[in-house]
Amino acid sequence: HETTGAVVALGPDASGIKVGTNAVVCSWVGCGSCAHCKQGNEHLCGAPNFIGVNKPGGYSDYVMVPHPRYLIELGDLDPVKAAPMSCSGLTTYSALRKFGSILKDLPLVILGAGGLGLMATGLMGKLDFAAPVVVEIDTAKRSAALKAGASAAIDPKDPDAAQQIRDAVGQPVLAVLDLVGSTETAELGLSLIEKGGRIVIVGLLGGDIRIPVPSLPLKAITLQGSYIGSPAELRELVTLLREKGLPDTPLDCRPLDQADAALSDLRAGKVIGRVILIP
């Protein structure tokens, strides 16, 4: 579901893009008739036809795209380096937009420095946002976060991790992006957030949290989920990156026939950044 490539053929009714054009595939294809789809939020469709999820995806030499509107021209962007934009790029871009302009002056706390965390950190520089404070248990990934532009990278296992985070932010914590989505990270975010703050949860690791209901109005906090992003947001992202360049996140390029090994490495936590499979 993270795919780029060159257009090699068009169906008889297809128009609006030329053969040979390098494009990123917007994989988030909805049913086209529900309320979400009519609002342009096909990623929230209840009966989706997602490429690479519900339909055959990019682990192949060719991929079928149902309409040219799901192909976004890359211009001069490297199609190999741009491949993660259709999911990890879009997912983090959409999540970052939910914080609004506050991130220009206020450091965001990012929980997790996997592929999404490093992507979010890199994108923040392209958006002219303040450098984030990243929280990550893995030493190598903390180092990668600093290289990607984080102002600090903190180990949540440290006994004084919460105070380290507050000190690194340097002002009340009003923005937390949870890219892990576990009981521990959600509870950490809730313990950090100050009055009027916002927590956006993207990660899907799993778990449960208990929140005293009065704390929500008394602290006036917002707890929000964010799932992928809309086709329009992907177009915005690609337009931004065609102007400012791709974020400098770690990429590990491998032949397509190494897909199984790449997935095994990912499952084992051995991947820093993203693996790119090349046919």
Image (tube, rainbow, N blue to C red):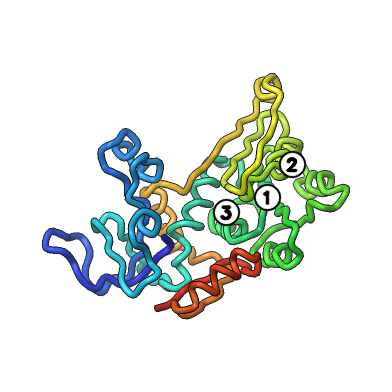
Confirm or deny contact between disc 3 and disc 1 (CB under 8 A): no
Residue at image coords 64%, 64%: 148
Write down the residue under mark 1.
111
Write down the residue under mark 2.
188
Q: CA distance from mark 3 to mark 1?
A: 20 Å
Horizontally, residue 254 falls left or right of residue 187, namely left
Write down the residue under mark 3.
128
Query: Regarding mark 3 in the picture, which secondary structure is present there?
Result: loop
Residues 214 and 57: in front is 57
**Residue 75 vertical placement versus 222 (above, below):** below
Query: What crowding class fits label 1: few (fewer than 14 Cα within 10 Å), some (14-19), or many (20 or more)?
Result: many
Confirm or deny contact between disc 2 and disc 1 (CB under 8 A): yes
Q: CA distance from mark 2 to mark 1?
A: 9 Å
Where is residue 261 drawn, in percent x and y?
Answer: 55, 74
Residue at image coords 62%, 44%: 206
Query: Regarding mark 1 in the picture, which secondary structure is present there?
Result: strand
